Image (spheres, rainbow, N blue to C red):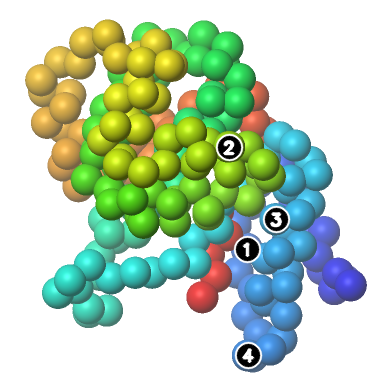
Amino acid sequence: VPPPYFLTIFGDPEHPRSHVVLAPRGGGKSAQRRMIEARADAHGKILCVTYERFDQPSGLNLGSVTHAYHMNQLSRLVLVGILVAINANTQLVNRLTSQQKRILKASIARFLGQLSTQQFNDAVSALKSFGDKASAFWRKYGGPVAVGINVILKRFGIDKIELPPQMLEEARRDDSLSYYFGELVQIVRTIGFDSTYILVDK
């Protein structure tokens, strides 16, 4: 049963705004998150990802978690969402400009290149607006991530795109994260989504 303010929180996908929901334990925060996921799925034009796994790499503690750490995680989730969408309809890649294709290839190298199979699975599982498409994507590309990435690049026709060495170097730098995140969100719009919803829940 949605609370009275639920529609305000869900908002207008064409003009999204950020909201913070505060409530005591058991107050229904996660239930509202799941309702947003379901509504986004029904809407069909919202890329909805849920950021709820905060697995810490070895040696990382709360005091050393940086803005860059979270931006890496969020960029990865949005990127995987883009790949799932294009995998379901490979014609979508034709909507991208040459620069967007280069951004996509550089982002794949940055955000997916060092993933473990479990981390890749977690990223696919975080997608809440694709239904069976996410499962199909995992069945097709899950396993050794490097192998899956090579197949993805070839299938989407971006394996032969040349990247300037300086672009690859820049993509690896943490001070470029906000730029690449913004570009990935713009790619989401280019391939036909109204907006990107990122639901943070812990």
Whether label 4 touches label 3, CB < 8 Å: no
- The disc, 1 or 4, on the residue closer to the chain's N-terminal end is 1
Q: Is residue 31 above or below residue 153?
A: below
In the displayed structure image, the side of residue 54 where residue 34 appears, left or right: right
Q: Is residue 122 above or below residue 175?
A: below
Label 1 environment density (alpha carbons within 10 Å; few <14, some 14–19, many ≥20):
few
Choose top left, top right, bottom left or bottom right for residue 90.
top right
- Horizontal and vertical percent position of residue 30: 66, 74
Residue at 50%, 15% (x, y): give it: 93
- The disc, 2 or 4, on the residue closer to the chain's N-terminal end is 4
Q: Secondary structure at mark 2?
A: helix
- Horizontal and vertical percent position of residue 25: 63, 90
Whether label 3 touches label 2, CB < 8 Å: no
Q: Which residue is mark 3?
A: 37
CA separation, marks 2 and 4? 35 Å
Label 4 environment density (alpha carbons within 10 Å; few <14, some 14–19, many ≥20):
few
- Horizontal and vertical percent position of residue 128: 63, 51
In the displayed structure image, the side of residue 180 where residue 7 appears, left or right: right
Give the label, 2 or 4, closer to the camera: 2
Q: Which residue is mark 1?
A: 19
- The disc, 3 or 1, on the residue closer to the chain's N-terminal end is 1
CA separation, marks 3 and 2? 19 Å
Name the residue type under label 1. Answer: His
Q: Quadrant of the N terminus?
A: bottom right
Give the label, 3 or 1, closer to the camera: 3
Q: Which residue is mark 2?
A: 136
- Horizontal and vertical percent position of residue 151: 36, 23
Q: Secondary structure at mark 3?
A: helix
